[in-house]
Image: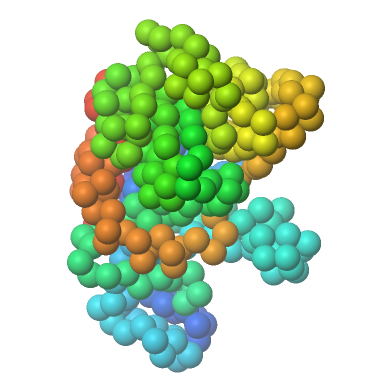
Amino acid sequence: MKAIYVSEPGKMEIVDKEMPQITGTTQVLVRITAAGICGSDIHILHGTHAYATYPRVIGHEGCGVVEAAGADVTDLKAGDPVVIEPIHGCDTCYACRHGHYNCCPDIVVAGVHVDGVMEEYMVVERKQLHPYDPVLTPVQAATAEPYTIGAQANAQAGTMAGDLVLIHGAGPIGMIICDIAESLGATVIVSEVNQSRLDLAGKFGAAYTINPGRQDLRKSIMDITKGEGVNVVFETSGIPALTSLSVELLSPHGRLVPLTFAPEPIPINFRLVNKNELVIAGTRNQNSKFKEVVDSLPGRRNRINQLVTHVFTADEVQKAFETAMDKNSGACKVVITF
């Protein structure tokens, strides 16, 4: 079978790989139909991912069709469309014992620690598969995993109806967080220097958009909120200075969810954190969000179709990654089909 393989940083190719076989009674053989390109895949290609091991079949945003199932799998049959949950924990550490397998210190992520979804066939444990409504195309279904990241971030923030929410960055995750926050009843502000992406934000439910390259971000926020500040900030841009600034843009009892893994410590004004009883909530992967997300995707198809700007076949993987990495390509989410 074909697989998209990063043998070492900077070297990606399509290789022939032996087709995997079911070896356990709870395993399922899945024929992959579509896989999204995530920023972490690009980091793995560039050698800047902190946790990836090489060589590696990359990809963790995937969906497919059941080909065969182990003897103990009775609720899935050949031909069923499924989304793949790409992570699992050790089941024994403190985090796992308390239901937070997403931050297990020994977490295993497909496409990072073990081979991922950018291959024609994959063997997956039944508990990591989520059937989806066939009204969705494979390309649409492949957005389920990034939507779980947005759902997890909003859960960490405790986003609720009436909240004023600020999102730094209008990339795929920023747009997904915007979509979910707006659906929860929040009023969303999106800040982004790339004007084409900022224009897209309005289609994902943003009530206000700010281009900080042309507008004073702090003044704009205070004008919109009448000086009170926003209730929630999501930092998805990866710019450390914006994480520091965010605590100054929050209202009392505000919440900050930084989605970035900056290589260096970021200074935070804890005088404001304590004075305003702010909450800084980390977020990593997702925790039990697949069912609610997969159930919601049919109602999000219009926005998903705008989120996915480019689709390539697996044979075009080099072009797909070049497009995803090109800030002038107009790309938001890029999906590869098998």
Direction from residue 262 to residue 3 in the image, left or right: left
Is residue 189 or residue 16 the one in the foreground? 189
Kindly identify the residue that appears in the image at 28 percent across and 41 percent down. Answer: 307
Classify residue 149 as left or right of residue 193: right
Q: Where's residue 94, x and y in %?
A: 78, 62
Viewer-nearest residue: 276 or 150: 276
What residue is shown at x 35% (from left), y 61% (from top)? 296
Q: Is residue 139 above or below residue 53?
A: below
Assign the C terminus to one quadrant of the image.
Answer: bottom left
Q: Is 337 rendered above or below residue 258? A: below
Task: Report x, y in % for residue 231.
Answer: 57, 34
Residue 177: x %, y % from top left: 43, 42
Is residue 33 visible in the rendered image? The answer is no
Query: Which residue corresponds to the image point at 41% horizontal and 9% vertical from the top-left?
Result: 215
- The percent position of residue 197, horizontal first and vertical second, equals 31, 27
Q: Quadrant of residue 42?
A: top left
Above or below, comparing residue 214 to residue 78 in the picture: above
